[in-house]
Amino acid sequence: RLHCPETRFYLGKAVRKDETFSCAASPLEVFTDLMSRARREIPASFSDSYVEYKSLISLTAKALLRYNACIFHAVSFISRGRAWLLTGPSGTGKSTQYLNWQRLFPGEIAMISGDMPVLKACPDGITVHPSPWNGKERMAGDCSAPLAGIVLLEQGPDNVFSDLSPADAFMPLFRQFVVMPETEEEIRALFALYDRVLRSAPVYLFVNRGDDASTELLRDSITQDGPGPEL
């Protein structure tokens, strides 16, 4: 039950009715503590419903760690039966690239989550699932798929798509996990999941202008056997 009815504004449609994740043994006490801490960290100008929204994400992300899963900040979509993650700081073009692709090549890709998909470790790799948190554009999907790759976005004057080594990808990608582990168990679970992510899929760096040419380069690069040329 939500503390603030307005919090529903931030939530997308419910998904995966066949699977549920239980939370803490005393969820009310845990959530009240999270709300108090979040209110101290979030400026007073933000509403209680926004604070509850942020607290729900934190609580959910920690609960998911027990199931070898976590929330990840990315636009996620399916291309040719496999999931791709477009990630990076806000303003680097994640939503722009997805919307451009839909406009230029309609019907080729399907949305998983527009902001915070769930990554779950499975015996054969990582599976990407939707979540209720789909960003300000409300881009929501209802399907899941195995992870094919991750594209880290940056803005720049030229469109360049290139390989990114695990060493160079480590910190930029780690920052995109939407969780702050506090116990040794949570830290171990998060790093075990992250290790699986890095071992399961290639990572690319995409410096982009956000124009149609950049989206064409992105499409050509991830639907072929390697990154494309500089445009």
Image (cartoon, rainbow, N blue to C red):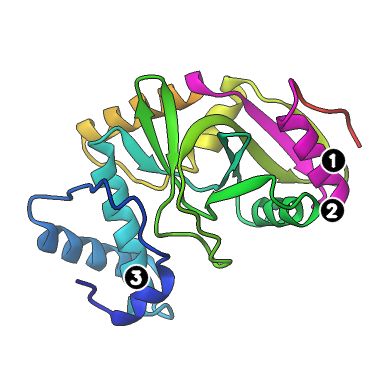
- In the displayed structure, does residue 79 sit left or right of residue 71? right
**Residue at 75 percent of width and 22 percent of height:** 226
Q: Which residues are magenta?
A: 199-225
In the depicted structure, whether residue 194 falls above or below residue 38: above
Residue 103 percent across, percent down from the top left = 77, 57
Q: CA distance from mark 2 to mark 1?
A: 9 Å
Q: Earlier in the sequence, mark 2 or mark 3?
A: 3
Q: Earlier in the sequence, mark 3 or mark 1?
A: 3
Query: Disc 3 designates what residue?
Result: 51
| Circle on res. 159 | 1
Q: Nearer the viewer, residue 117 or 88?
A: 117
Q: Nearer the viewer, mark 3 or mark 1?
A: 1
Tag 3: Cα neighbours inside 10 Å, few (<14), some, or many (≥20)? many
Residue 201 highlighted magenta (yes or no)? yes
**Residue at 83 percent of width and 42 percent of height:** 216
In the depicted structure, whether residue 2 falls above or below residue 108: below
